[in-house]
Image: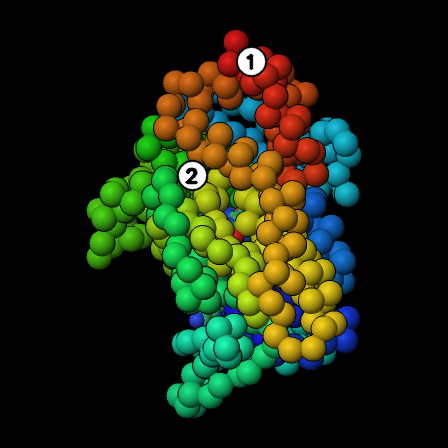
Amino acid sequence: MIAGAGPAGSAAAALLAGAGWRVVVVDRATFPRDKACSEYMSPEAVRLLDRLGVVPDLEAAGAVALEGTTVVGARGSRLTGLFQEASPAPFRPAGLSLPRRILDARLVEAARDAGAEVREATKVEALLHDQGAIAGVMVRGPDGRHAPIRARLTIGADGIGSIVARRLGRRRRALPRRVAFVAHLRGVSGMGRTAEMHVGTDGYVGLNRIGTDLYNVALVVPQAQAAGARGDPGGFFFRRLETFPGVQGRIQRSHLAREVLVTGPFASRASRVTSAGALLIGDAADFFDPFTGQGIYSALRGAELATEVAAGALEDPGIPSASALAHYRVLRRRAFAGKWAVERLIAYGMWMPSLFDRAVSRLGARPTMAHALIGVTGDFVPARRVLNPRFLTRMML
Ligand SMILES: Cc1cc2nc3c(=O)[nH]c(=O)nc-3n(C[C@H](O)[C@H](O)[C@H](O)COP(=O)(O)OP(=O)(O)OC[C@H]3O[C@@H](n4cnc5c(N)ncnc54)[C@H](O)[C@@H]3O)c2cc1C
């Protein structure tokens, strides 16, 4: 059984059901539903969606081609990294942007099409145990009744506040503690074919086109500051946007197309991602910071890795032991260690605005390096291309 039908849970459900396993996936939400997200996907995330067969439908639903990212520093420095200029070449020249409302509902449909049973408006409230192993979950269904779902394998894909992760072990909270405010707006002026990240002295703003005259605007600030939004998140959001010089005057409150969603604080990871009978994928396993826009990719790739290990472990009868699932941890480290390091390099770099500005301005003057960095955050260029003394020295000097 799978707890959570976001990108991680739906992808895992589609892959396991497609391989012939009986899968039940539950989500407390009813789809389509909104999700606070910048709705940016790299070409590599699109490659994973392509494996699930959903890309033509997403394009038909109005997904926008995304060519890369422009980063603007607090003192006006600027770099533009383009996916198709990076080496090695990406799966396709552009990523995609579209509302999560459309993406996630299409992934749920892919899980159903593959044969998974998807139960919506069904909340996981507790885990079931059998001789020390996880043996399924207790859910509360749409009628308010509690019912057990017994399973040989329980996959926790229930996002950043994951109940499965909390029952498996301690959640490790990490710095930076940030909170995000995300809205959809019309009429954002001056947008090109890249997403924009505007970094300030204590927070950042992401702008991303997600449809014809529809834009995602995300403000990320330290948790301490977000307290000022209590009672009027919209007012706080629009006031703070105006403090970013590159955003000033481009966004009108009257053009709001979807209310401001608030989420956070983030930066937490599970102390254990596997245990007898259970494993964690997507944000339930770890989520650091949205700046690099890699969460959906990680959710989909984590689902691939987990289902690879799960399918092997389920060949033997009974609940898989902790050691039968342990290889998942190794695969995760191999797949994500570079990403974890780059995410932290960027997030901690933002704490030193003058240093950050210097790096952005150096990379802006050296487009090949800027393309390489965007390729790394786009998950198709190996992280070692930027995590090496030569790149880091040239970025600063
Ligand atoms: C501000 C912000 C901007 C972001 N921007 C980007 C971006 O541009 N690009 C990108 O790739 N990533 C981005 N991310 C990250 C991305 O949103 C996540 O990494 C991604 O959604 C993870 O997918 P998931 O399936 O693990 O979790 P989720 O998408 O959170 O799905 C979890 C599902 O579990 C369900 N659930 C939760 N608890 C229960 C329960 N107890 N019982 C049943 N169901 C439950 C929820 O309803 C939800 O549907 C951003 C994140 C934030 C916060």
Q: Residue at x 70, y 50 (%)?
A: 46
Q: In this rendering, is residue 219 above or below 306?
A: above
Q: Along the horizontal axis of the image, is 43 left or right of 253?
A: right
Q: Residue at x 55, y 44 (%)?
A: 293
Task: State how far apart marks 1 and 2 are (Cα).
Answer: 27 Å
Q: Pick whichever, 150 or 19, lies toward us.
A: 150
Q: Quadrant of the N terminus?
A: bottom right
Q: In this rendering, is residue 390 above or below 123?
A: above
Q: Along the horizontal axis of the image, is 242 left or right of 115?
A: left
Residue 348 coordinates in the image, percent (x, y): 42, 30
Under tag 2, what secondary structure? strand
Q: Is label 1's Cβ within 8 Å of ligand 1?
A: no
What amino acid type should be assigned to the residue bearing mark 2?
Answer: Val
Residue 54 coordinates in the image, percent (x, y): 72, 62
Residue 42 coordinates in the image, percent (x, y): 65, 44
Q: Pick whichever, 377 or 331, lies toward us.
A: 331
Is residue 354 visible in the rendered image? The answer is yes
Is residue 253 visible in the rendered image? The answer is no
Q: Pick whichever, 289 or 225, lies toward us.
A: 289
Which disc number belongs to residue 184?
none
Under tag 1, what secondary structure? helix
Q: Pick whichever, 174 or 249, lies toward us.
A: 174
Q: Is label 2's Cβ within 8 Å of ligand 1?
A: no
Outermost residue, top side: 397
Q: Residue at x 47, y 88 (%)?
A: 147
Mark 2 closeness class: few <14, some 14–19, many ≥20 residues within 10 Å:
many
Mark closest to the chain's N terminus, 1 or 2 = 2
What amino acid type should be assigned to the residue bearing mark 1?
Answer: Thr
Q: Which residue is mark 1?
A: 393
Q: In this rendering, is residue 121 above or below 214?
A: below
Q: Which residue is mark 2?
A: 205
